[in-house]
Image (tube, rainbow, N blue to C red):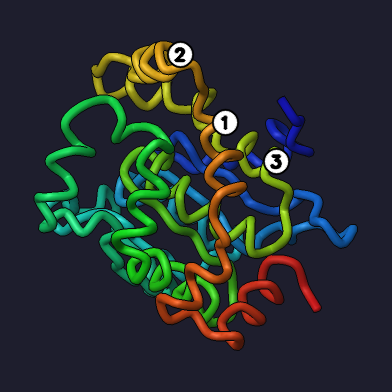
Amino acid sequence: MTRVPGTVSERHLDWDGCFNVRDLGGLPTSDGRTTRRGAVVRADALDGLTAAGWDALVRYGVRTVIDLRNDDERGDDAAPRPSAVTTVRIPLDVSEDREFWSVWDSGPQFGTPLYYRPHLERFPQRSAAAVRAIARAGPGGVAFHCAGGRDRAGQVAMLVLALAGVAPAAVAADYALSGQRLPARYAARGEEDQGVLLDAFLAERGTTAAALVVATLAELDVEACLRAAGVTGEDLAALRDRLVGP
């Protein structure tokens, strides 16, 4: 697998109360540049942050949080959310579409990139809204999160990194990093580690999560998909400026 620069010592962020937080900076792009550190962060549910965790987030420069979870997943913050942070809520799933989810949330496939392309084809506007929110956020860093920080956050990270010109293999390697971080989250919650189950499920189908991310990007014109769903040229320019620079 392609090595992601700065994987452990530089990109993983230890914010108290969360387990799967990392900076999307430090990744090489196709034009020879590198994604900026401190610009965009992916995470597990930030409402679990302690006061020290929120302090670390603010000191890191994050000023906008994008919550990708459904309304019924949200609870009270474990510690007061700083006034310096603006929260934007964009439920990515469109969980009310039961025709779609009767297929995709009926087994382990929901915890894998198998559903990314079907979701993007059926609900491109939700992914477009998340990308626009990152692009249009005010000054400071942006952190987006779902529950565990792997799949919905992984889908948005895949799109953002692809638009920034990061190679598919490096995008896939970024996705795989969640497998290193989520066991501690499961343990803290008294839950069984789902990573083993998901890996076995995909192995039975002759694939891996990383291979699925690469295949999705090979089959999908990300920019065309998102433009058709409302992302403008100005949004794309702003996103690339935020994540890569002029």
In terms of sequence position, does the residue under pointer 2 or pointer 3 come before the other?
3
Please state, as top left, top right, bottom left or bottom right, where the N terminus lies in the image. top right
Q: Quadrant of residue 148?
A: top left
Residue at image position (45%, 40%) is: 16
Q: Alpha carbon of mark 1 to alpha carbon of mark 2: how far?
A: 12 Å
What numbered label is drawn on residue 210?
A: 1
Q: Are marks 2 and 3 in contact (CB under 8 Å)?
A: no
> Could you tell me residue 157's position as x and y percent?
53, 52
For mark 2, what is the residue? 203
Q: Quadrant of residue 176?
A: top right
Callout 3: few (<14), some (14-19), or many (20+) C-alpha neighbours within 10 Å? many
Q: In the figure, is residue 32 to the left or right of 46?
A: right
> Could you tell me residue 225's position as x and y percent?
48, 68
Name the kind of residue labelled 2 in the image: Ala
- From this view, report whether residue 6 is shown above or below residue 120: above
Residue at image position (25%, 54%) is: 93
Name the kind of residue labelled 1 in the image: Ala
Q: Can the viewer see residue 85? A: yes
For mark 3, what is the residue? 170
Callout 1: few (<14), some (14-19), or many (20+) C-alpha neighbours within 10 Å? many
Q: In the figure, is residue 22 to the left or right of 66?
A: right
Residue at image position (74%, 36%) is: 4
Judged from the image, the secondary structure of the residue bearing numbered disc 3 is: helix
In terms of sequence position, does the residue under pointer 1 or pointer 2 come before the other?
2
Is 32 or 79 nearer to us in this picture?
32
> Could you tell me residue 165's position as x and y percent?
73, 59
Q: Are marks 3 and 1 in contact (CB under 8 Å)?
A: no
